[in-house]
Amino acid sequence: MAKIFISTALPYANGPCHLGHLRSTYIPADIYARYNRMIGNDVLMVGATDEHGTPIAVRADQEGCEPIDVSTRYHDLILEDIKSCDISFDSFTRTTDEKHYKIAQDYFKYLYDEGLIYEETIQQLYCENCGKFLPDRYVEGTCKFCGADARGDHCEACGRALEPTELLEPHCLTCGNTPVIKDSTQYFFKLSSFQKTIEDYIANNESLPANVKNYAENWLKEGLKDWIMTRDMKWGIPVPIEGAKGKIIYVWGEAFLGYISSAAQWSEKSGKPWEEYWNDYVIHFIGKDIIYHHSIFWPAMLAGHGCKLPDNIFAGEFLSLEGRKMSTSKNWVVWVADFVKNYESDLLRYYLTVNAPLNKDTDFSWDDFQRRINDELADVIGNFLHRTFTFTHKFFDGKIPEYKNPSEDDLAFEKAIKELPDKAGTLIADMKFREGLVEIIKTAKAGNKYFNDQEPWKAVKEDMQKAANCLYLSNQLCHSLAILLKPYIPNKADEICEIIGIDEATNWNDAKEFLETGHEINKAKPLFKKIEDETIAKEKEELYKNLDASDVEDKEESDEDKSNKKSKQDKKSKKDKKAKKEDNGDKMDLISIDEFAKVEIRIGEIVEAEKIEKSDKLLKTQINIGEKTIQVVAGLAKRYAPEDLVGRKVPVVTNLKPAKLFGTLSEGMIMATESAALLTPDDCEVGELLM
């Protein structure tokens, strides 16, 4: 049994949680924690709110209150958001807790005493009217690079990092006064002395995912520079050095230690030493915007203290909203609290997991959310469960029937059920949370096909044992789903357990055990309600209301311009083609080698396929292209049955602009002959780039 220390990035206590926080950090951490508890590992999952720093102080100034009032308000809201989505923390604390202050000051003092923190006089902006130095967020001005309005740490227009002294025409955010430059003594951490340590840590740690390694290695190439660890302001943890009055520890110099202080508070309550978990296996779940901090700054601080470095840093990529970057300032965002008012949290957990692998940026779309819930949870999982439970009650008095003389179809389905726990579990253990969920859904789809093929409603009249075998195995898959879905959608998993008549799922390996003949199940009840078009239309209407009028106008102009441009291009294209045909007679249209080189073709493996309703030609497929799985609509239905395609390797054009065919999103094109015959590159590797 392993002891596992799991932490989540500390949310900044100046606003509630939105969907991006859940997708990149909390949901994957919770899936991993729940799975490990179910396989018998001893898990300590900790988090806290990050409550220091200038943004909170600035907001307090604007609101005419104390910073602690702002951070307390948002700590409470964040904690409620986390609870509403069933994130199973063992400890969730605050960086304003007394315990955190002591740990942070002791840590700083240790590094100072070891000669790893030193004093240096630098120039900073000072507001003579307010009588104080101005940390980055207290200054606004003009970006020296692009001329846009910018704040003292960052220009949103061009994306460049800034120092307050680099701003043109700076002014104090509090009073509007033009600051002057004055000398200030600050404390610096000798980050540069850890260059080799961090290089070795990044290069030799096989657990680190590619995005973390790449970000860190790019930073290391430039050479590490010493890191300022203090600020001149009141709000924060005071520097514990004599003569450092009025200085606080920079928020990034103490926020990391929220993992430790949260764990330490858990230890005080539980009586268990948190160090045992840290010294066994440590994994941080973060968003990609703080990879540098966790892969370079934090390991260096730990190394300076002689501590074990994290075993893994799992960084979720960004989530956009309806094709736009999320913006809390423009309210282009979906807040967790608003979402759970109208939908069960399990639906959100499901969608944010299955939408895309976490190592890829992805988009939250209300239309796609509806499609996934309706087509997968309701039509696949919900339909299979409901039919199984209903027919068991109708034909076998609610008891699992006897299983004997199995057919080849029975044995194949039985094998799939028994293999599923190990398949899904291995994927979760490898941090492939989406792929594990897809494996579960794929088996449920196979269950629906098996159920349809066996036709138990007919078999009860012609071959009762055939019907009995069908319902026996179908109930076994339901039992397995109740357990395996627990890390993903815990509330619905508990409801399935209740119907099937078992205790709440706590042991992953129970999914490998079959229920006995005669086991009684409860009556079926609807588990997944379909989301109506009107509901989604209302969500999108409310979302677009939040945009500034100028943003909407810009978007409309942009769309109109694009439409006009496309219309002109289409007319020109038709005219050019007509002229070319007139010039060349019946000759084939030719393209240049440069045009051909733009096409990206990869080998993909079809992992799912199904017919599109009301179309006799089109199939909807899910294709693994190595780095991700894409959805492709293909005109193959007249030549191939969906089940015949699963497992086939096909060449796929992967850099086509996504389009909707028959109302279904298609993200690529399967290469086939004019008669819809597939090309079969069976000797190629999945994901292999052909051109």
Image (tube, helix red, strand yellow):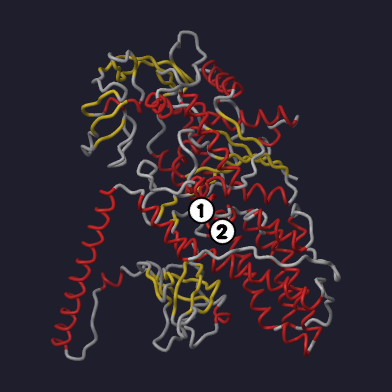
Q: Which residue is mark 2?
A: 434
User: What residue is drawn where x is 21% and y is 74%?
Assistant: 570
Q: Quadrant of the N terminus?
A: top right
Question: Can see residue 226?
Answer: no
Q: Which residue is mark 1?
A: 358
Instruction: Choose top left, top right, bottom left or bottom right for residue 56.
Output: top left
397 left or right, relative to 200: right
Vertical arrangement, residue 608 with respect to residue 406, above or below? above
Q: Quadrant of the C terminus?
A: bottom left
Which type of secondary structure does the marked residue at label 1 adopt? loop
Question: Can see residue 224?
Answer: yes
348 left or right, relative to 553: right
Amino acid tagged 1? Leu
Given residues 371 and 617, the one toward you in this image is: 371
User: What residue is drawn where x is 47% and y is 82%?
Assistant: 614
Vertical arrangement, residue 115 with respect to residue 300, above or below? above
Q: Position of residue 479 (x, y in %)?
A: 74, 64
User: What residue is drawn where x is 57% and y is 49%?
Assistant: 27
177 left or right, relative to 454: left
Given residues 484 and 371, the one toward you in this image is: 371
The reply to whether the C-beta atoms of the residues labelled 2 and 1 are less than 8 Å apart is yes
**Dot 2 surroundings within 10 Å: few (below 14), some, or many (20 or more)?**
many
Given residues 407 and 58, the one toward you in this image is: 58
Amino acid tagged 2? Arg
Q: Position of residue 137 (x, y in %)?
A: 35, 28
Q: Position of residue 234 (x, y in %)?
A: 44, 17
Which type of secondary structure does the marked residue at label 2 adopt? helix
Q: Upstream in the sequence, badge 2 or badge 1? A: 1
